[in-house]
Image (spheres, grey):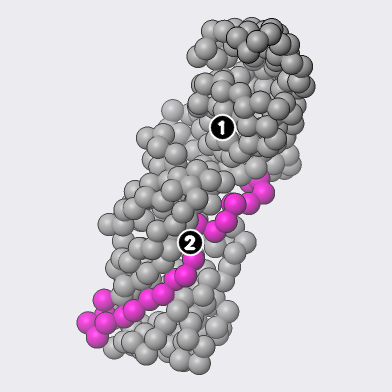
Amino acid sequence: LNLGIFGHLTIPGIGFNAVVPFKGLDNLKNTKYVYAIEVNPSIDGNIYLAAIVTINNPSFLTLALGDVSFDASHNGAHIGTSSIKKLSLAPGDNQVISYTTLDMSLTAAQQFSDGLATGAQTMSLSGFAGSSTNPALNGGLQAVRTGITIPMYFQGSSMSQPPYKDWSVKVSAAKVATVTATFQSPYYGYPYEFVNANLDGYENKVLGAGMSVPSTDVALWFFKNDVTFKVSGTGSVTVSFDVDIPKVLSPLQRTAYTDMVNYGKANGKILVNFDWAPVIIVNGDGVERIVDWTSFGNSFEPIPIAVGADFANILL
C-alpha cells in the first residue's frame, strides 16, 4: 500500500503480493477548526483549548494512528502543543477533539492570543520525532506540515445541534418549580457527562424574552447544582429536576411574572433565554469543563418553555 507520508507497505497472504496505491493523508492540509468546547485561561498562566476540528482523510482506508501530538507555532515561533487522543481517520471528513495548550510565557503565544481579539489567526502544526505513541508512525508524522485557521475569540461556527430541547416547567402550590427537558450532544457525535448545573461564582439562570417589556431579562429561575446525567454521542436523555424560583416577589418581579403567566395562558408556553455555563466531561476524558450553553451566545434564542395552568402558582 502507498501510505503517502507513511511510505509503502506490501501485504502478502492473499494469493499474491499486492501494492495498492492511494492518495495518503496529503499532509493533513484540509484540517479545519469547527467549534470550541472550552477555552480555559488556567491559573497556571496557560490557555487550554478543547475544540472540534475536521480532518479530511483523502485515502480509501481507515487509519488508526493512536494518540498524536503536533508542535503549534505562529508566524514561525513556537506557541504550544496540540494533540488528539486515539486518532482514527475514516475516508472523508472526520470530526475529532483537539486539545491545545498555549504556553503564555512565550511572547509568540501572547501575540497569537492578542491577535484573536481583532480577527482570525493561523496556527501552524508540525510533526516531530515523538508525535505518535506508536514509534512506527513517527517517521511519517514528523513530515507533517499543516495550518489551521482559528477564528476571532476562538468562536468557530456552531454546535452540531442545541444541547437541550422540549423544555417544560411545573410550579406547585408550595412554589416548588420542576423543569423537564431533553438533552443531546452538541459536540458532533461525542458523548458527555453532566456534572454540575450551577458552579459557584456563576449566575446560571433563565430570563424572560420577547413576551413583554417588563418581563424581558427578568430571571425566571436559577439552576441548582444537584443535576447529573450522561448522554451518548447520538442519543438523548429526558431529565426532570427542581430549580430555584423567588419565594417572595418584588413589585418588579410580580409585574414581570404576571406578564409571563398571561402569555403562557394565551400560548401554552413562555419564551426565555438561557444564561448558562454548566460543568461537563466530554468523551470520558476525565476533565471537568465549563461550557457555554447560553441560548443567545449560540444563536438559538428564544427557547420555548411549555407551561400549564399551574404556572400561575409562581404568583402566590
Q: Looking at the figure, which quarter contains the N terminus? A: top right
List x then y, in percent, for residue 162: 54, 59
Q: Tell me the crowding category of disc 2: few under 14, some 14 to 19, or many 20 or more residues within 10 angstroms, Cα based.
A: some
- Please say if 237 is above or below 52: below
- Separation of marks 1 and 2 at Cα, in angstroms: 24 Å
Residue extending farthest to the front is: 15
**Residue type, label 1:** Ser
Q: Earlier in the sequence, mark 1 or mark 2?
A: 1
Residue found 47% across the figure and 70% down from its top: 166
List x then y, in percent, for residue 201: 37, 52
**Residue type, label 2:** Tyr
Q: Looking at the figure, which quarter contains the C terminus? A: bottom left
List x then y, in percent, for residue 72: 63, 22
Q: Is residue 208 left or right of residue 112?
A: left
Q: Secondary structure at mark 2?
A: strand
Does the residue at mark 1 contact the one at mark 2 (Cβ under 8 Å)?
no
The residue that disc 1 covers is: 98
Q: Tell me the crowding category of disc 1: few under 14, some 14 to 19, or many 20 or more residues within 10 angstroms, Cα based.
A: many
The residue that disc 2 covers is: 164
Q: Is residue 157 left or right of residue 304?
A: right
Q: Check if residue 168 falls in the magenta segment.
A: yes
- Please say if 208 is above or below 145: below
- Please say if 311 is above or below 298: below
What secondary structure predominates along the stretch shown in magenta?
loop
Residue 253, quarter of the rendered image: bottom left
In the image, 146 versus 22, the foreground residue is 22
Residue 120, quarter of the rendered image: top right
In the image, 17 versus 201, the foreground residue is 17
Residue found 42% across the figure and 82% down from its top: 307
Stretch in magenta: 154-176
Q: Secondary structure at mark 1?
A: strand
For the question of whether residue 37 can be seen, the reply is: yes
